[in-house]
Amino acid sequence: MRNLDNLVEDYYQKYYDLVHGSQWKFSFLSIHAAIEAKFRRDDHYEKCLELGTGNGQHLGFLNHQYDIYIATDLRPIINPSLTELEEGVLPQNRGKYKSFGDATKLLYKDESFDRLIAGCLLLHLPNTLQTIDEWVRVTKVGGRVDALVPTSSLTVSLYRSIFSRRKAKKLGCFDYDLVHALEHVTYYERVIEIILGRYDDFQIEVQHFPQVLGRVKFLRGYSVIRIIKSKL
């Protein structure tokens, strides 16, 4: 019987950035640009928390102003522009910080942040309700949670066939589909039903991407769900 314990970790350390980097950073498929599509330069969110940050790529796509930005991940964040910070601590000085962080068990106090950002993260977390409750808990009243969630659509299948699966194999990763089966447990269709049912007194906004194509469900690659923590 094959041991699969280190398979996922090995994929993220060796292949993930090489497989997805160019498409998601620079093309119309960019998840980072999609998350920030709602914001303008004169918007201001004093304290921001990013979950599952990788190596901090999302910072380069921010459209709004901020005072404190904390990037967190379960894995070490390799980004010299970010100052190391103890988990659960809110700094006093303005700046960009990095910290260890479990997105399902945050050590921050209630209502600590004006904005919480999660890229392609909910896809990997089975306990959707408990996780989003935790995100909403640390968000201030009037603040917002912006989370990207892929869909199980034709567009996603085509992306994998044309780009990511082929590239992974060229790089020597022959367990691409197995990694996805182990890691990808929660798609948009489940997440949106849970959020709408749970937070029926909050303002919920959804944007589908790619733009235009995303209006058609089976062509939708991913969606950005925005929870505004305020009464309707």
Image: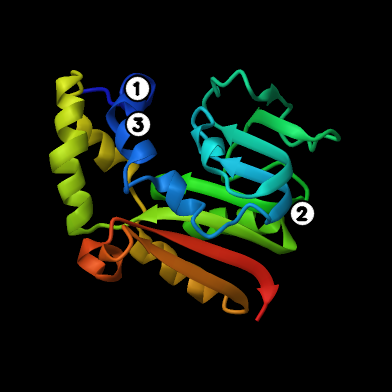
Mark identifier at residue 26: none
Residue assigned mark 2: 110
Q: Is residue 58 left or right of residue 139?
A: left
**Type of amino acid at the residue the image marks with label 1:** Asn
Q: Nearer the viewer, mark 3 or mark 1?
A: 3
Q: Nearer the viewer, residue 199 or 7?
A: 199
Could you tell which of marks 2 and 1 lies nearer the N-terminus? 1
Q: Quadrant of residue 203?
A: bottom right
Nearer-N-terminus badge (3/2): 3
Q: Which residue type does callout 3 highlight? A: Gly
Corner quadrant of residue 204: bottom right
Label number found at residue 21: 3
Tell me the element at label 1: loop
Residue 73, above or below 160: above
Going 53% across and 63% down the picture, which residue do you hit? 226
| Placement of 25 over or under 17, stated as above or below | below
Q: Which residue in the protein does label 1 denote?
A: 6
x and y percent of residue 52 in the render? 51, 38
For label 2, the crowd category at 10 Å Cα-Cα, with few meaning under 14, some 14 to 19 and many 20 or more, is some
